[in-house]
């Protein structure tokens, strides 16, 4: 019986740890393609400003703050209104996309 319990425990632990290691972290580009692509393009104007324009004006922290709560931030950015909807993103996704956006600074 003890061997059976140890086998089940070992199997459960190895299954859990394999799930942790196989979870893929999304890249900034993948986050962009998931959440932002419909309104933003990297260097051309679409419904929203291009990443090159955002990167020229915003900091890493400002980009993340705007993603978290666009309605709270739009006035501080000098916009007349906020057309951006609230996105349900994780901290890791916001960090990744903010870095991706800032990679377009100067382009």
Image: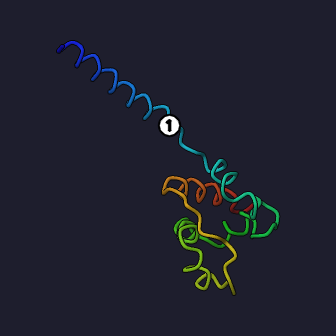
Relative to 4, say whether 66 is above or below.
Answer: below
Q: Residues within 10 Å of mark 1 (few under 14, many from 20)?
A: few
Relative to 32, say whether 7 is above or below.
Answer: above
Q: Nearer the viewer, residue 15 or 60?
A: 15
Q: x, y percentage for residue 35? A: 66, 57
Instruction: State the quadrant of the N terminus.
Output: top left
Instruction: State the quadrant of the C terminus.
Output: bottom right
Give me the residue at 59% from left, 74% from top: 70
Q: Secondary structure at mark 1?
A: loop
What's the colour scheme? rainbow
Q: Quadrant of residue 66?
A: bottom right
Q: Is residue 13 left or right of residue 58?
A: left
Relative to 89, say whether 65 is above or below.
Answer: below
Q: Is residue 6 left or right of residue 12?
A: left
Q: Quadrant of residue 16?
A: top left
Give me the residue at 50% from left, 37% from top: 23
Give me the residue at 27% from left, 23% from top: 9
Q: Where does label 1 land, which residue?
A: 23
Q: x, y percentage for residue 48? A: 75, 70
């Amino acid at each position: 019986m003890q061997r059976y319990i140890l086998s089940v425990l070992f199997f459960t632990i190895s299954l859990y740890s394999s799930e942790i290691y196989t979870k893929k972290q999304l890249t900034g580009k993948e986050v962009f393609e998931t959440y932002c692509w419909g309104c933003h393009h990297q260097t051309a104007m679409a419904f929203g400003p291009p990443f090159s324009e955002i990167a020229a004006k915003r900091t890493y922290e400002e980009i993340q703050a705007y993603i978290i709560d666009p309605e709270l931030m739009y006035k501080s950015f000098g916009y007349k209104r906020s057309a951006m909807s609230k996105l349900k993103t994780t901290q890791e996704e916001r960090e990744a996309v903010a870095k991706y956006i800032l990679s377009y600074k100067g382009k």
